[in-house]
Image (cartoon, rainbow, N blue to C red):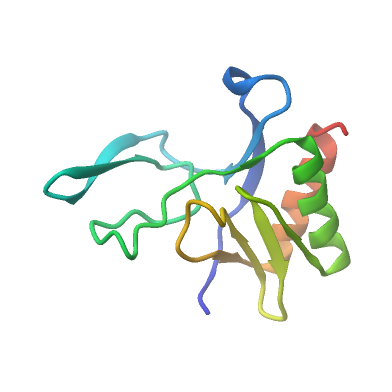
Amino acid sequence: MTIKNIKCIVVQQTHMGDDYWTIERAEHDGRSWMQSLGPHSQAYCLSSRLGEPSADTNEHNNADIEGDSREMLAIAKAIEDGGRASFKRCEAVVTEEGVELMSPRNMVAPVVISHANAKALAEDIRAKVKG
């Protein structure tokens, strides 16, 4: 398990309504691009997403970790309590090594961040998301 030193924040996606959020990299270059996945397939990628893009469909992991305020607050609670919260498009699992974040629907594997970065994410969620 590789722990990534990724500082994460929660961002409100107002184009999806008032109650939709994504977990994103705090630091990124704002790029978006189309990643080829084969002769007739492409994926829309964003540098703000935690997962890495790949031309191999079995390894492509660049997807939004997203949910509503109830789900984001559950993610924060799981991080704070050392537990787990899992929904269709967002999941957090606290392990001894770090915190696994992913979209069960759209990612092939979790991105593991440090406990310190996860704690900061939980604090950011609590500060921005109202339930």
Name the foreground residue: 131 vs 119.
Answer: 131
Q: Residue at x 75, y 44 (%)?
A: 72
Quarter holding residue 94: bottom right
Q: How many marks?
A: 0
Q: Which quadrant, please, contains the C terminus?
A: top right
**Residue 126 in picture, x, y percent from top left:** 84, 42
Q: Residue at x 85, y 61 (%)?
A: 80
In this view, the residue farthest toward the left is 39
Where 116 falls versus 131 (above or below)? below
Is residue 81 toward the left or the right of residue 52 in the image? right
Is residue 110 toward the left or the right of residue 77 in the image? left
Q: Residue at x 26, y 38 (%)?
A: 34
Name the foreground residue: 30 vs 55.
Answer: 55
Where 17 falls versus 24 (above or below)? above
Name the foreground residue: 46 vs 56.
Answer: 56
Is residue 99 toward the left or the right of residue 74 in the image? left
**Residue 128 in picture, x, y percent from top left:** 79, 33
**Residue 30 in picture, x, y percent from top left:** 42, 33
**Residue 19 in picture, x, y percent from top left:** 73, 26
